[in-house]
Image: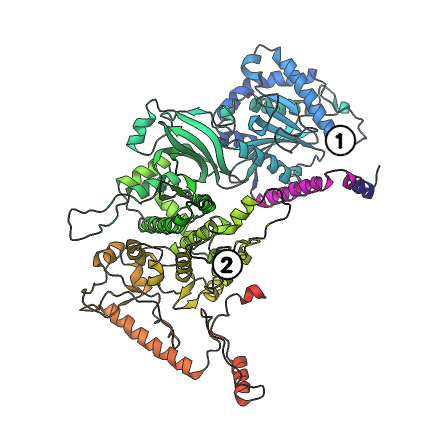
């Protein structure tokens, strides 16, 4: 026995010892994270309940009735005992060796039966992996049941067995991190898995763990081993062992597509045909699916998999001689399917751009979306999740990779700014039109905006949210039937529980600080971070780094330690236009980056009446902001600016109007201030048909009086209504009253402190000395009156 210190010294003296320790630490931290993720998600099920949930109750009933007696007789002939004395504690390897001896002996005995070909033929090879890791991996499960015997990788494994000495019935909870690590490795390599089964041998008892997207089930199969001292023919333990082995053999003889796999093989076949069992999305797709259209599946492009929740796999494919993408995703049944989102966006009828032309009925569908060839459900519902497929056109290169390539080429570099402005206008148009159709994207990131042939596509609507109720017509009924979901349930779930979705690096600061509301501003802020990342030097620097062992320092705006730290850092970086681009690693040279457009997006998202919104974002989830027309026009098209006005509320929800506001004539010059409630009730077509925007203001309070010398953002002018409604008069009287109260409070000097303003000059406090009457009175007033304004942005980050 060597002491721990000597072992540590020996390991450190070996070459590669540091890498070994780092690898062990990485595995340990990953398993702790998996155990934490599964905390409270485990559930114990009886065996009959489990087979009923999988849909195998009838098959197992027939199997048990015909084979149970044979298993009991055969177990009496198989000397499956531990090769140690009773008083000596066996090792884990002893349990594994004994299980393998029992398995081979029982397999040989059962093969002599007349029912062997029908009931006892195991289709998998059992392989010991205690000493040798799985091919292309570093994990060493004890035993694997694989489709192939040579070079077995996780793609070829059907079932894993892990053995421990602990015989307690809850021993699986102590090793759930390791078991979940194996389940995650299988799920990453096998996209057609509906669930992942694992065998856990603790002492002489065997458990079956079934990992699903929602959590896991634990079902005890019973004892499968016994000691030499228990070797008596009338021992009831032998009968329990026979019953447990009958259950085990039932699962081992099932074909793969009946026990965890959608298809008969663990991977995705290279050629697929979507038969009548898969319901396509449209009638045109149904015609294609019933023909001889074959989908040729290529390499795996990307996957997003975790032990619980949604899983997504992307494959290169060819469909009708066209480059396509095959997407397989597991999503919750009470959430909106991505295929249904595309159908709703394609069916949306945009309002006409010109009311004078009665033949102009508007365009059909949301622009800049990928074309969907085939779509539907492969699994409608298993433990609250569906398995959905999408066959869509290939949309080109991710936008960040595109601009990094453009900026690296001297010939195409001058066109980068023009392309950026064009793509941003296209993306904002897509997001605004989708929101008008009732859908919010919620996952704008570098990988979800693709560029091809001068067009920017917004893809991956798997986390989209409904922001309005769809009418109960034939179209909605057809979509709900094809994807097996209920519109009301989906809408209710999104309303009561808005999930924390998105790519953390590109999520808005408000969401990272714990906001429970999402809107179009959050998606536009994510778009800003995507464009900053596209023109940032951090990607080009990492590409140019080849053999250097030093890590390249990241710009402060893209350093991500945690969501809250990143949010506070970015709020601080967006206060000043002078250092804004540099904080994100973007050159301030107009020839190298679209500085004007990026700064306009910064002012539009983080400023209201020239005041930075950092304090309000940090401390108030429900605040007001004004719509900056001049900044919006710098990165949006004119049509998008007009269309986004009725939709700019914090929760992204648009309510259908009951009594629209009256519109003014074109010649009137007085601006109309619209309350947020009235703005939410105004349809998009109402403002589009007027040809002029409105000044949008949330709440009844008028805008904060601007300091001397500061210019406000230009207000939208709809003109003054000829006959104002009583609601408008009442709102005007309330606004005038609150404005007078606000001015009275400001004159009394009880509101201490000033909000942070962009490029504001520091106050001159030289006239107020310590001990002077004014200083003492201010000190007493500060102690007596609590602050009513928010602290300066970035102050919390500096602390």
View extreme (front): residue: 411
Q: How many marks?
A: 2
Magenta portion: prevailing SS class: helix
Q: Quadrant of residue 452?
A: top left
Label 2 vs 1, first from the N-terminus: 1
Confirm whether the magenta stretch covers residue 224: no
Q: Quadrant of residue 208?
A: top right
Query: In which quadrant of the rendered image does the N terminus lie?
Result: top right
Q: Secondary structure at mark 1?
A: loop
Q: Which mark is residue 627?
A: none
Q: Is residue 664 left or right of residue 776?
A: left
Residue identified by numbered label 1:
91
Q: How far across and how far down the image is residue 458, in percent? A: 38, 44
Q: How far across and how far down the image is residue 441, in percent? A: 39, 48
- Mark pair 2, 1: CA separation: 60 Å
Q: Is residue 500 visible?
A: no
Q: Quadrant of residue 83?
A: top right
Q: Nearer the viewer, mark 2 or mark 1?
A: 2
Q: How far across and how far down the image is residue 657, in percent? A: 26, 57
**Which of 369/658 is in front?**
369
Q: Is residue 455 visible?
A: yes
Q: Is residue 40 left or right of residue 704?
A: right
Instruction: Identify the magenta region.
Output: 11-40
Please tell me which residue is depicted at 57% across the width and 41% down the height of the picture: 42
Query: In which quadrant of the rendered image does the C terminus lie?
Result: bottom right
Please tell me which residue is depicted at 52% across the width and 47% down the height of the picture: 540
**Which of 204/342 is in front?**
342
Confirm whether the magenta stretch covers residue 34: yes
Residue identified by numbered label 2:
582
**Which of 713/492 is in front?**
713
């Amino acid at each position: 026995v060597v002491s721990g210190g000597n072992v540590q010294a020996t390991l450190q003296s070996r070459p590669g010892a540091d890498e070994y320790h780092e690898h062990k630490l990485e595995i340990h931290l990953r398993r702790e994270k998996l155990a934490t993720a599964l905390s409270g998600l485990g559930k114990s099920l009886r065996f009959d309940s489990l087979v009923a949930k999988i849909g195998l109750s009838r098959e197992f009933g027939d199997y048990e009735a015909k084979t149970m007696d044979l298993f009991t007789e055969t177990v009496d002939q198989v000397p499956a005992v531990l090769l140690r004395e009773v008083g000596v504690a066996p090792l884990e390897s002893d349990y594994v060796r004994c299980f393998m001896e029992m398995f081979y002996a029982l397999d040989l005995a059962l093969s002599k039966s007349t029912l062997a070909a029908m009931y006892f033929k195991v289709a998998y090879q059992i392989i010991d992996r205690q000493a040798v890791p799985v091919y292309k991996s570093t994990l060493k499960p004890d035993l694997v049941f694989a489709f192939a015997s040579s070079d077995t990788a996780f793609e070829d494994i059907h079932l894993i067995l892990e053995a421990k000495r602990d015989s307690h019935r809850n021993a699986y909870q102590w090793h759930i991190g390791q078991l979940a690590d194996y389940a995650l490795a299988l799920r990453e390599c096998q996209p057609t898995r509906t669930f992942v089964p694992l065998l856990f041998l603790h002492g002489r008892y065997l458990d079956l763990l079934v990992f699903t997207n929602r959590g896991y089930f634990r079902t005890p199969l019973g004892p499968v081993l016994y000691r030499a001292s228990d070797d008596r023919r009338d021992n009831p333990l032998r009968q329990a062992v026979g019953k447990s082995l009958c259950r085990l053999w039932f699962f081992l003889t099932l074909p793969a597509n009946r026990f965890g796999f959608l298809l008969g093989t663990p991977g995705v076949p290279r050629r697929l045909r979507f038969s009548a069992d898969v319901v396509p999305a449209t009638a045109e797709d149904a015609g294609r699916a019933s023909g001889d259209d074959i989908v040729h599946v290529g390499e795996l492009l990307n996957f997003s998999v975790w032990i619980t929740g949604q899983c997504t796999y992307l494959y290169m494919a060819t469909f009708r001689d066209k480059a396509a993408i095959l997407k397989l995703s597991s999503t919750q049944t009470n959430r909106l399917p991505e295929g249904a989102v595309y159908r709703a966006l394609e069916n949306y009828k945009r309002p006409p751009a010109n009311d004078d032309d009665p033949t102009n009925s508007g365009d059909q569908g949301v622009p800049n979306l990928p074309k969907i060839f085939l779509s539907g459900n492969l699994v409608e519902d298993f433990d609250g999740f569906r398995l959905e497929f999408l066959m869509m056109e290939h949309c080109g290169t991710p936008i960040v990779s595109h601009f990094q390539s453009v900026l690296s080429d001297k010939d195409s570099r001058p066109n980068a700014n023009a392309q950026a402005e064009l793509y941003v206008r296209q993306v904002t148009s897509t997001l605004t039109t989708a929101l008008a159709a009732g859908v919010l994207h919620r996952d704008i990131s570098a990988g979800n905006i693709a560029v091809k042939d001068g067009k920017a596509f917004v893809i991956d609507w798997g986390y989209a949210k409904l922001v309005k109720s769809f009418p109960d017509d034939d179209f909605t009924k057809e979509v709900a039937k094809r994807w097996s979901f209920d519109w009301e349930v989906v809408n209710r779930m999104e309303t009561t529980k808005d999930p924390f979705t998105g790519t953390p690096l590109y999520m808005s600061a408000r969401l990272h600080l714990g906001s429970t509301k999402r809107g179009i501003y959050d998606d536009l802020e994510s778009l800003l971070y995507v464009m900053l990342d596209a023109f940032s030097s951090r990607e080009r620097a990492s590409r140019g780094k080849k053999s250097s062992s030093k890590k390249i320092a990241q710009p402060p705006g893209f350093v991500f330690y945690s969501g809250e730290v990143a949010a506070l850092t970015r709020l601080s970086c967006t206060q000043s236009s002078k250092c804004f681009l540099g904080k994100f690693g973007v050159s301030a040279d107009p020839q190298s980056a679209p500085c004007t457009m990026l700064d306009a997006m910064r002012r539009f998202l983080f400023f209201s009446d020239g005041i930075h919104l950092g304090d309000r974002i940090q401390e108030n989830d429900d605040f007001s902001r004004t719509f900056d027309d001049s900044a919006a026009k710098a990165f949006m098209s004119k049509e998008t600016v007009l269309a986004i006005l009725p939709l700019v509320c914090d929760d992204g929800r648009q309510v259908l109007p009951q009594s629209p506001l009256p519109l003014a004539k074109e010649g009137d010059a007085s601006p109309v201030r619209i309350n947020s409630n009235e703005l939410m009730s105004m349809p998009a077509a109402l403002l589009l048909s007027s040809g002029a925007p409105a000044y949008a203001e949330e709440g009844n309070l008028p805008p904060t009086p601007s300091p001397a010398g500061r210019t406000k953002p230009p207000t939208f002018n709809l003109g003054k209504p000829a006959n104002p409604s009583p609601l408008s008069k009442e709102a005007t009287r309330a606004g005038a009253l609150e404005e007078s109260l606000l001015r009275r409070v400001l004159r009394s000097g009880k509101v201490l402190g000033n909000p942070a303003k962009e490029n504001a000059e520091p106050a001159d406090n030289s006239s107020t000395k310590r001990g002077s009457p004014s200083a003492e009175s201010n000190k007493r007033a500060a102690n007596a009156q609590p602050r009513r304004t928010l602290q300066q942005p970035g102050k919390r980050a500096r602390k």
